[in-house]
Amino acid sequence: MSALQQVISDLGLTEKLRKIFQTPRSRWEHPLALLVIGFFFTGVLGTLLSFTVQTQQAKRERARQILDAQHAEDTQHYQSSTRAVVDFSDSLYLRYVRAGMLKSALARGASSKEIRYRKEQYDEALVRQESTALSSHLLIREALKEQDYDDWETGYQYALKPRLNLLDKDLTIASDAYLKGSKKTSKLIQAKLKDASKVYTEVRVCNSALVNAIFRSLSSKQYLSGTKVIDTQQKAKADLNEQCPTQTPF
């Protein structure tokens, strides 16, 4: 290629480059526009995305805290409710045990001193159980979230309590007759001990049935839901009625 042709070629390339750079740019290609767009995506959208993520995390955290608080409240309620049932059970079984010890002492012909001591212990257990019965019922009613007189109070009042009263009557008559020391009272003592032994077994069964029914009902509300709670309560009630049927109060 000659020098003249080379010059012409270079001039043509130069002209093409000039036209390219002199062609008007789109508004979107303007450096300021690119700067604004970059700020929008990195700043506004980034901030919005970060805010959305933080909001969702905050909602999840609040939901978790509410759930934890409810769980803690339910656990505390269950523990206090269980304590109420345990205290009620303890008072019943203490009275039952003291009655058994007195009955045993009478049956084996213990000394008058021992009979008096056993009778005093039994009377103390009776007073403790009777004097706390109402408060125990109220606490259990609260545990079971019942507003009114419930089935378990009915079971106590018309099934267990008549038997407790009959046992107390038999043991009191037998103890008084024993302490008099009269031979004429021997048959009376034996008759009352026989009656006491029968009702003593019934009291044990009723104690167990009643406490078990209350505890099953309480546990069902803690761990079950829906119809399972009702089914468990109905089963507990049926078991109580079968094992400890109601009687006319003594």
Image: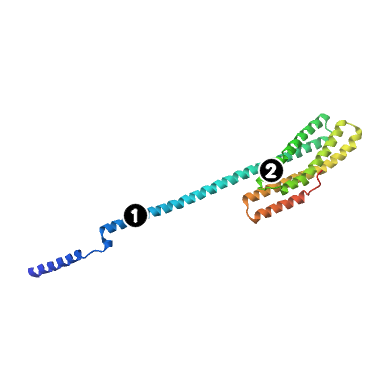
Quarter of the image where one finds residue 26: bottom left
Q: Which residue is mark 2?
A: 138
Vertical placement of residue 95 versus 214, above or below? above
Viewer-proximal residue among 212 and 169: 169
Q: Of the residues shown, which amino acid type is indicated by label 2? A: Leu
Vertical placement of residue 248 versus 37, above or below? above
At a point 84% along the width and 42% down the height, the residue shown is 195
Q: Is residue 108 visible in the rendered structure shown here?
A: no
Vertical placement of residue 212 versus 1, above or below? above
Tag 1 secondary structure = helix
Quarter of the image where one finds residue 112: top right
Quarter of the image where one finds residue 202: top right
State left or right for residue 19 relative to residue 196: left
Q: Of the residues shown, which amino acid type is indicated by label 1? A: Thr
At a point 70% along the width and 41% down the height, the residue shown is 136
Q: Which residue is mark 1?
A: 42
| Other-residue count near label 2 (Cα within 10 Å), few / some / many at <14 / 14–19 / ≥20 | some
At a point 67% along the width and 54% down the height, the residue shown is 230
| Other-residue count near label 1 (Cα within 10 Å), few / some / many at <14 / 14–19 / ≥20 | few
Spatial distance from mark 1 to mark 2, Cα to Cα? 64 Å
The colouring scheme, among rainbow, by chain, secondary structure or one colour, is rainbow
